[in-house]
Image (spheres, rainbow, N blue to C red):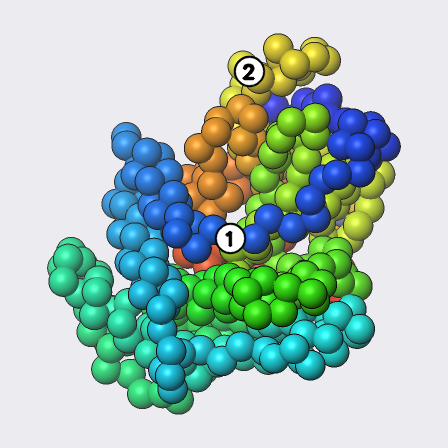
Amino acid sequence: MSASATVRVMSPEEIAARAGGETPFLRLPERGTVFAERAMRLRQLARGHAMADYLDFVADLAQAQQRLLDGLAAAAGPAAPALPDADALDRAARAGLPPLPAADGPDAAWRGLLRALLADLQRSAPAATQAVLQRLAGADDAFLDRQADALLGGHADGPDLAAAPLVGAALQVLWTHQVCAVQAGTAAHQPSRGAPFGRTDDERACPCCGSRPTASITRSAGESLGQRYLHCSLCSTQWHLVRIKCSHCGSDKHLAYQSLEAADAEPAEGAGSRAAQAAVQAETCDDCGHYLKIVHSDRDPFVDPVADDLASLTLDLLVAETGQRRHGVNLMLLFGEGAAEPPPDTGPGG
Ligand SMILES: [Zn+2]
Ligand SMILES: [Zn+2]
């Protein structure tokens, strides 16, 4: 590990004071751009990268995800994914639960989405990828549902690792669509109702679908500097969590930040040195031994939590050497341990 510097970040109190209490809690996905921007970032990161082929593959996948999501905007009828009605949204809000829980499994429409995605990719995919595309395209509903269950629930059998990015991509499109459609439907048809999504009882899980984050992203907007959002691994929603807080155990006591850039070690305080720092860091917690990456949009405006997480695999390897375990979930690249690990509340030991 080349750098494990103490980084100057604002305390929760400082952030609250500067934000004037106006930090939006949620940043919902933008239907028109969410996957397209990821694809662009992946292409940018792929240039000269040791994992260029894989990053380009995930970029192709993200572009296909965007086309699929675009098509769903106008989808109606039996093939359209179901959405929770007003009563279901109310029940979830009163119970402090996410309204689109991943734990309940996907709407049956997800298989149609996966098959459309496979057909799209088969037109352009390289030979190395065609085999898994064909295998999945020929799989029956029961197999596909088992794969979805394994990905969403971290079940014992574990997912088929070659198929997982494709299955995960279809599930991301489904949940991203549902979040966008619920939000748009409430605004259009029931404007007097409150927002359909909001705080739930577990601030470490996605307030829309209950999934774990892929990574954090810092965002600055106007007066609110360096706010930290957790990026949902499934539905692309970003929700606010104060800085300097472990997203796994909630501790704010023994956190540190590690990055790959040796030249950025031991920064002094102040904006100048912060700007020179790595765009990707690992936030490690000595209390529970887990880490989550944090990507900084104020250091690189094009960072994307999913893309930059994939492209910084070397950082995972280095942090793992110190005994830390990964908390972030990236459906495009499953880590054996992370994939099987239960969420914090149900884990045997934390
Ligand atoms: Zn989510
Ligand atoms: Zn922790």
Residue found 18% across the figure and 58% down from its top: 125
Q: Is mark 2 within 8 Å of ligand 2?
A: no
Where is residue 231 drawn, in percent x and y? 58, 50
Amino acid type of the residue that numbered disc 2 sits on in the rendered structure: Ala
Q: Nearer the viewer, residue 239 or 71?
A: 71
What residue is shown with label 1?
A: 29
Q: Is mark 1 within 8 Å of ligand 1?
A: no
Residue found 86% across the figure and 32% down from its top: 13
Amino acid type of the residue that numbered disc 1 sits on in the rendered structure: Pro
Residue found 33% across the figure and 78% down from its top: 112
Where is residue 22 drawn, in percent x and y? 75, 39
Q: Give the number of the mark in front: 2 or 1.
A: 1
Question: Left of 67 or right of it: where is 233?
Answer: right
Residue 276 numbered tag: 2
Residue 10 sits above or below residue 269 on the image: below
Residue 49 numbered tag: none
Q: Nearer the viewer, residue 239 or 221?
A: 221
Question: Left of 24 or right of it: where is 219?
Answer: left
- Asked if residue 50 shows in the view, the reply is no
Q: Say what secondary structure mark 2 lies in.
A: loop
Residue 264 sits above or below residue 302 on the image: above
